[in-house]
Image: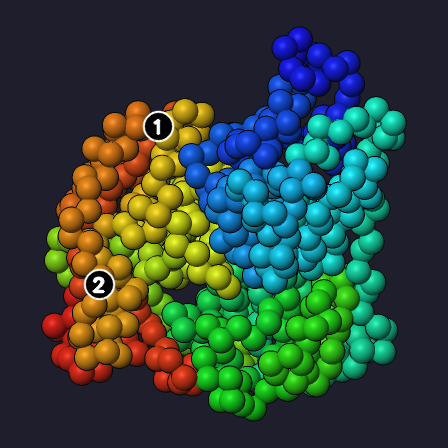
Amino acid sequence: MNATSPTAAAGLRNGAAWVAHALEAEGVDTIFGYPGGAIMPFYDALVDSKLRHILVRHEQGAALAANGYARASGRVGVCVATSGPGASNLVTGIADALLDSVPMVCITGQVGTPLLGTDAFQELDVFGMTMPIVKHSFLVRKVDDLPRVLAEAFRLAREGRPGPVLIDLPKDVQVGAATHLPAHVPAEVAREPAPADAALAEAIAVIAAAEKPVVYGGGGIGIADAAAEFRQFVEATRIPTVLTLRGLGALPGNHPQFLGMLGMHGTRAANIAVQESDLLVVVGARFDDRATGKLAEFAPFARVVHLDADAYEISKLRTADVALAGDVAAGLRALTAGLAARYRAGSPVESRHMDAPAPAKDPQDDWRQRCGKNRERHAARYDAPGQDIYAPALLKRVSELAPDAIVTADVGQHQMWVAQHCRFSHPRNHLTSGALGTMGFGLPAAMGAQFAFPDRTVVLVNGDGGFMMNVQELVTIARCRLPVKMILLDNSSLGMVRQWQELFFEKRYSEIDLSDNPDFAALAQVCGIPATRIEQRSEVEDALAALLAAPGPGLLHVKIDARANVWPLVPPNTANSQMLDSNPNEQKAESAHALPA
């Protein structure tokens, strides 16, 4: 034990030390944080703990790194900050975790309990401030509450629909004697029950009877760790499948049933199939507005079978004809088994003895063929004219060179290009801020993912706007020698805002000019990170190969056309069938990187 610490000097194990040991007992090995006055006893306890603490350069970086760690690993991410501004700087990362159902425990220091409510130095009501953006908040008022609070916090973060939990630790609780407390024992996490048998039987009958079914998968598949069960279900039924932004990876990008992402920047094949379907089998999705477009005109002919762990999501926005509330993996296994039994009883997909009569044609076969032809007809093209770097083609190549990489994306045009043109083998390989749309997410999330998997390739794709929002974490990457491969797509503007101003605000461009960006390659080099800048298409192949082969961190600064837009696009408050491929007010030839018809 550190002989100079107050804990050692007193010969006692205090509340802060007990918390550190409790984190170890919960299986935590890495925490992200930034110290300060009210959390200092906990930082003193870290000296004697086995926990690896990552000193970020801003508390928002700590919350988003813990967020990325949790998304990539499925484990609880932990971040720590002091009271007042330290705690308030965590708020965006906490909100991001709530809206995307990411398990986190956030520990904040607080002024001593006698000073609560006195406007003491760096006192802030973080308990009240975070109530709308956590699953639960705890303000620990005495040392004896620590065992209950720590056990409940981790249980709540993991159980059911995961999310963030806040523990506010007053300073006197941290320094209070804790030798009488028992060793921490993690609370048992209850698993969601399987959906009701009667509902499953009804769903099986509805799916079997459909002529134009579509599977609509979302982020709940990865959250439930049900990617294997989802794939088995799709392969057993051969139903054409679309995925949301956060569902990507639930099917491999080259899967024969996968039509692509649906929604505002989804593929034509996906959106057409959904709009023409007579049944949506919704798995772990919530009918988000970016996926549905104008909700009243979304899949207008389809009945809905909705499987979700969160019963409150079912029929919240679209009434479900069959509600399957419960464990997603168990529900998928039951559906697969039930449909397989039906096939054995007379399905056209079941192999038969050569003397048996020829099976009747599967009524869904025409639909499968139609969806497949649409996928081929509307496949993305990468032969854009000119010598400028075409971002979709570059990102497609990243996937080819690093097919099993964990890819983190920030928010903006590049986020949609990643979703459209990268291919993911698992949902945990694609990390992005979905519901909150947090600019600044990408860089610290990549750090968290790399700490979770130090031996895997982690690729950050960022835009120049989002990159600058947490650029200070370059120093953390350099300090820890994290081998994150950073690709910065620089169009010298807030690209998505510029695109919307071009299309929907009569080109009245307002505060989107970032032409005074720093030299990002030089900036990375100053931080001790090797960096390269490219501007021509001919430079892409060698630059990507060098970046991915480097043993440590690296940054590739990629200049792209400021006029390049993300296509297709469903305009706001419009049905998903009404997709744009270019600015309707201009000739295609005038649009940057317009492709021939």
Quarter of the figure with residue 574: bottom left
Kindly identify which residue carries mark 2.
511
Q: What secondary structure is found at the residue carrying circle 2?
A: loop
Q: What secondary structure is found at the residue carrying circle 1?
A: loop
Q: Which numbered disc covers residue 550? A: 1
**Viewer-proximal residue, 479 or 191?**
479
Amino acid at pointer 2? Glu
Q: Residue at x 80, y 49 (%)?
A: 189
Quarter of the figure with residue 524: top left
Q: Please identify the quadrant where the N terminus is shown.
A: top right
**Viewer-proximal residue, 52 or 19?**
19
Q: Residue at x 44, y 60 (%)?
A: 437
x, y (%) of residue 70? 59, 45
**Viewer-proximal residue, 370 or 542?**
542
The image shows residue 185, relative to residue 217, as above or below, that is above
x, y (%) of residue 374? 41, 76
The image shows residue 509, relative to residue 232, as above or below, that is below
Disc 1 crowd, CA 10 A, few/some/many (<14, 14-19, 20+): few
Relative horizontal placement of residue 201, taking residue 484 as reference (left or right): right
Q: Earlier in the sequence, mark 2 or mark 1?
A: 2
| Most distant residue in the top direction | 3
Q: Residue at x 71, y 28 (%)?
A: 175
